[in-house]
Amino acid sequence: MTGRTKARIAAATGIMLIAALILHLLDLFPARDIVLFASAITAGIPTAIRAFQALRAKAFSIDLLVTIAVVGALIIGEYVEAAVVSFLFIFGAWLEARTLEKTRRSLRDLVDMAPQEAQVVRDGVTLTVDVDDVVVGDHLVVQSGGKIAVDGVIATGRGLINEATITGEPVPASKSVGDRVYSGTIVDNGFIGVTAEQVGDDTTFAQIIELVEEAQETKTKAQRFLDKFAQIYTPAIVVMAAAVLVFTRDIEFALTFLVIACPGALVISTPVSMVAGLGNGARHGVLVKGGDALERLSKVDTLVFDKTGTLTRGRPEVTEVHPVGMFDADTALALAARLELASEHPLGRTIVEQAVERRMDVTAHPTHVEVIKGGGIRGAVDGHQVAVGSRRVLAAMGVLLADSTDAHAVDRERLGNTAVFVVIDGVLAAVVSIADQIRPEAREAIAALRTAGIKQFYMLTGDNRHTAELVAAELGIDVAKAELLPQDKVRIVTELKAAGHKVAMVGDGINDAPAIATADIGLAMGAGTDVSIQTADVILMGNRFDQLVHAYSLAKATVRNMKQNTVIALGTVVLLLAGVLTHQVFMATGMLVHEISVLVVIVNAVRLVRYRDKRAAAATVPAAPLSADEGEALVDAQK
Amino acid sequence: MRTAKFETEPFTCPSCITKIENVVGKLDGVAETKVMFNSSKVKVTFDDTLVTADDIAKSITALGYPVLSHKVAA
């Protein structure tokens, strides 16, 4: 039976009921009863068919209870009861379907964002093809307002790309040749050619939808219990109603019992909240793997952060080049950078990047390169003997470190930098300070999480103690543990759990994977890798702190909503039972109350669809000033 | 073995799950049936030499849940 048939039957029987009421007022009783009888049959037959279909499949459905009740009422001549119950049941089912759609709308909206077709260039001709027919390696063209249909790399052109579907980030990103783009994102302005690398179900977008769909089907403990309960509940009610009939010889009472015992609101109470909550998260770039994860997240009292890449940007930057000899800062940096071309070390790469940024020529590779034990490198660059490394390397090479220079380096370290020394021709030439920038929005997010109910914050890092303490103080973190290896992180998380805390681990998902898996609940900031999608229970797609705050308060709100719904559903059952036993409630009233309770439960869950925590909104990153490129594109857009 | 997803009209009662899983599960060639209640989809793993996706769609429709669309994964 489609929704439309349901609506038609409900409308037809509704009109019949009104007609019956008019006939009643006109004292035309035989005519009234005929209309009521017809109404009960019209609404009852589809219900009976479903009940029969279910029985053949050995499933006991609510339809069966209602069918027995309606047939019974007709036999004993209670036409009013029969007509009203069958009408309310079918009308209620239609209304339920309509409101249930609302709780599922977030996901629906997301699915609707999926691209349907793509413009592909094949043999020099641009064709519009179905998205399923695009293959890896195809060259796609996307114009302003167009949807990108694959995951791939921009081969030509540039544009402002709205990636809200993937990251929840409302501000469009400026992308050009070589940048990655994702299926489901929209070119706000520009014209790009994309080489397809992942198509169809392999795209990030398809995986997100798959993940959310699967998450919605996972069941909490309470739900699994209710499902089992419903399985034995319906047949049990039939048996009990029969017993009631045998003992009381009161057919009407037994039939009332059948109707009010429908488990509707109880069975649907927690799943609707969960679906609405998960959908809300998905729309804000917060992917939660199921109601179970949502429940665990809501109970968290200890939040453990990884530092690098989570609390900091994860992109170390040169903060200062301090010359101490006869070379100026730029020369020292240029020579150091050219030497570091031969290095794989992240700090080395940072120095190279800085030099490139300052538009220095760093193309010629060094010669006679050797790695110095204790953290350094040396070689010949441009006729100079250059060495770059830590304090220990200076000592190993016998290079003199003046007290004033040492004091400067220590100062920088206290400010959260790593000091790197550049030696040219055996003499110390410069101190390069490198720091990973703290993400400023983290501080507000942590404060917001604290008010939302997190009791303590930990920070785990492999970095030095100075930097760790500085970052912790800056962000308001309670405990900082420095100089850790990945296994130490796992050990600390295990210890916290053993101490009775509910621990959430927040990391960037790759090196923190073991700790994320160990914690009661693991959160991955950013969805760059499959590892993070697989290991974490919660994925913050946009790698943003306001999403972390939203995830936590949403989890709490959803669990609260589930509890409210359970109370409403159980309360209704108790109230109805009491009403029936004291002969205050009969079939039609029972059905009405029952349908109302189901709707109340659904409407309560619908509130979650729009839920947005004020604290999360406050912690949103202020929009970054537009870069020159973006500004230019915007101007173009306005022309 | 292939996997197909059938999208139906929105499910409202959890008893539909048992109904569909029992009936579709008994079709020849069907290995696994999973009803996704919240996304109104039925995921079926089947042997395409014994049964076609259209047959499965027909049996779901016959149970009273019109199949709106279906997609067979390669």
Image (cartoon, rainbow, N blue to C red):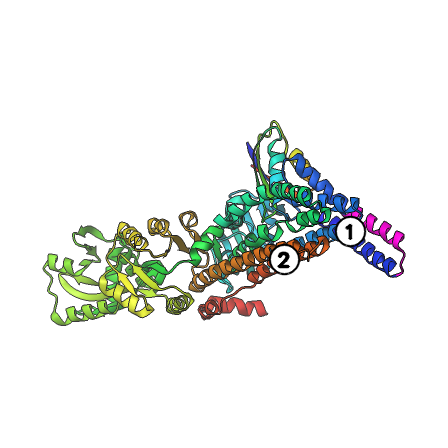
Chain ID for label 2?
Answer: A
Answer whether labels 1 and 2 touch (C-beta < 8 Å).
Answer: no
Q: Quadrant of the C terminus of chain A?
A: bottom right
Q: Is disc 1 placed on a helix, strand or loop?
A: helix
Identify which residue, A96 or A320, lies in the foreground.
A96
Query: Within 10 angstroms of label 2, few (less than 14), some, or many (20 or more) residues?
Result: many
Per the image, the residue denoted by label 2 is A597
Checking the image for residue A83, the label placed there is 1
Checking the image for residue A604, the label placed there is none
User: Residue drawn 42% across and 58% down?
Assistant: A299
Q: Amino acid at mark 2?
A: Ser
Indicate left or right for A503 with A415 as reference: right
Q: Give the image location of residue A343, x and y in percent.
A: 26, 53
> Residue A595 lies in magenta, yes or no?
no
Chain ID for label 1?
Answer: A
Q: Which residues are magenta?
A: A26-43
